[in-house]
Amino acid sequence: MEIMQLDFEAEELSGQSESQVITWRLELPGKAKMVDEGTMRIYTTQRDFVGLAPLVMDTEILNTAVLTGKRVIVPVRTVAVEQDGSVTDVSEFTDCRSTNEDILKVSDRCDYVFVNGKEMRGKVRMAVNFTYSYLSAQLEMTVWIPRLPLQIEVSDSELSQIKGWRVPIVASKRTRWESEEEEDRKGKGCMLQFQHALVRVLTHFVADQPDQREQLAYFLGEDWQVDVTKLVRYFLKVEDPRIARLQAGRVLSGRDVGVTTIQVMSPLSDSILAEKTVTVLDDKVTITELGVQLVSGLSLSLQLSPGSNRAIVATTTTQEVLQSPKQEAVISSWIQFSDGSLTPLDIYDPSYYILTVMSLDEGVVSVRKSPAVVVAEGEGQGALVKVEMVISESCQKSKRKSTLAVGSGTLKVRFQPSSQRPGNRGNSSSGGTSKPQGSSNYNNNGEDNDGERNPLQPQQGLMNSSATEREESALRKVTTTAKSTVQDVVLGSISSSSEGGGDSLSGMGNIVDVGNSAGSGSISKEGGPSSDGSVIGQGLGKDHSNLVDYTNFPSQVEVPKRKDMEVEVEVEGTT
């Protein structure tokens, strides 16, 4: 039964949205008055809003704060929608609350959601509630958290001294002679070099399902891992620095005989996030091969990843053909040891060795130093460059040079007509080309370039254990005695991997490098046969480049003849 109708009118609105409280009072007639009070709230607004929408650029967040101690945030803007579809930004007048602050937090002003590293879990479809006036809405986010303990991969966990390679003793290091021959003692102030190894840290990013009965959800899938080496580099340490040390957070070098561990420390507590045992042995290895590759350019092809519809495989291939006079090729080198390990040369201190680069046919190529490059002079092909590695002058025992290893590099020089040269320039730098899936790579003459590149075929008797090594052409011994011009150059090897992708790591694949920004890392795909690298994920709003596919990357395999590095790149939404 309807008793009455009341109309209310707001005289003036002082803000974007207000609520008015009306108090009702019921009095009954009679001597004993029974008074009953009630209240109601009426919302007054300048516009007729019908909906509320919190907006974010990304609905996924990688909780790298657990690894770095730095907050990862996703900005939020909240808009109110009117009946006609127009929207008004009401972010400053919105209230908000996270349904679980142990997973995801929201700022006091409701302008961003964030994680600060104190979270214990991740979750798919994590809800944050937003309210404005009489409107309410939920924002759903997926929060990925690193799975602990992290996994530390070392290209060689047993390091030995390198026979014949003497290096200066640092002032803080006491002299220790481990040579079998008394002659080694003649190198005053020098000691034998220890082997180096590459280190990387991997982990899965996981999240709880909305239904707790379901299994954990994995970022990009259970067979994918994130390379977080860059993120944790300042928290990587060697437990006993007298045994070994870390350089730049990724190169492990022996210092003395013993056993120690590599640890990843938490930035927020004293806990250890990962641990790996390494051993420095009291024996010696010899350098059996010096691998040399001459790189004149790079080509790039893209195709969808067969393992994930959210990723693209970018395959970078080195070229070993010079197509114009005075075009240059850089030199990339690696060394193989008698224990079967293979290491890029550029992870060793370049002041501890000298590379002597010689042209074996000056009519075809010449050598220019500082830095050492090979320059095209005339047409020809074959083993055109000889590289000799000797110890630094300060540790030479006599006038006789102490040669550690000799290698040769093959190259083809075939000039194109001036009109067909890339950019019509005499000195061409490497460029990237895109190749559709299923198509072939062709040079500017329309000829198939496959014959100009070393195919990625195994070679018996050699070992492969790193991204850089996969990029190198096969090792060849120098057998020629042709007259050559010698130029001595002190330098390290040239690796085309920007972060020294020469890791020699076992059983991993698909490395992704997401850069140094918060919430970034690298991704690795386990399992099948595949090459190192900030985080890739759909809608991360970060640098989603440099996914490297390591689907054929065991710790000790045969050396390929060509760099063939695959990069997994995350694709966002409809991009």
Image: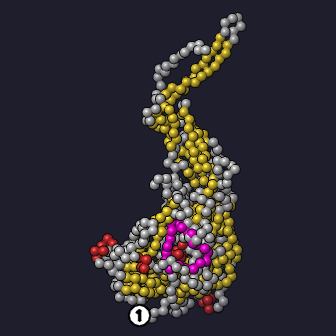
Q: Is residue 480 magenta?
A: no
* Above or below: residue 529 compared with residue 409: above
Q: Residue at x 57, y 86 (%)?
A: 288
* Quarter where residue 88 is shown: top left
Determine the residue positioned at 54% across, 72% down: 467
Count neighbours of disc 1 (C-alpha within 10 A) and say few if under 14, some if 14 to 19, many if 20 or more. Answer: few
On screen, residue 325 versus residue 13, left or right, reads left
Q: Is residue 401 above or below residue 60?
A: below
* Quadrant of res 556: bottom right
Q: Which scheme is used to colour this image of the protein? A: secondary structure
Under tag 1, what secondary structure? loop
The residue drawn where x is 56% and y is 51% is 60
Residues drawn in magenta = 548-568
Q: Quadrant of the N terminus?
A: top right
Nearer to me, 241 or 420: 420
**Quarter of the picture holding the C terminus:** bottom left
Image side of residue 231 versus residue 326, left or right: right
Three-letter code, disc 1: Lys
Is residue 488 visible in this depiction of the protein? no
Q: Is residue 550 left or right of residue 293?
A: right
Inspect the magenta stretch and tell me whether residue 557 lies in it. yes
Depth check: 245 or 327 in front? 327
Q: Is residue 3 above or below residue 170?
A: above
Residue that carries the numbered disc 1 in the rendered image? 483
Q: Residue at x 52, y 66 (%)?
A: 548
From the top left corner, tell me how far across and down residue 445 is, in percent. 34, 76
Residue 240 visible (yes or no): yes
Task: Tell which of 211 and 376 is nearer to you.
Answer: 211
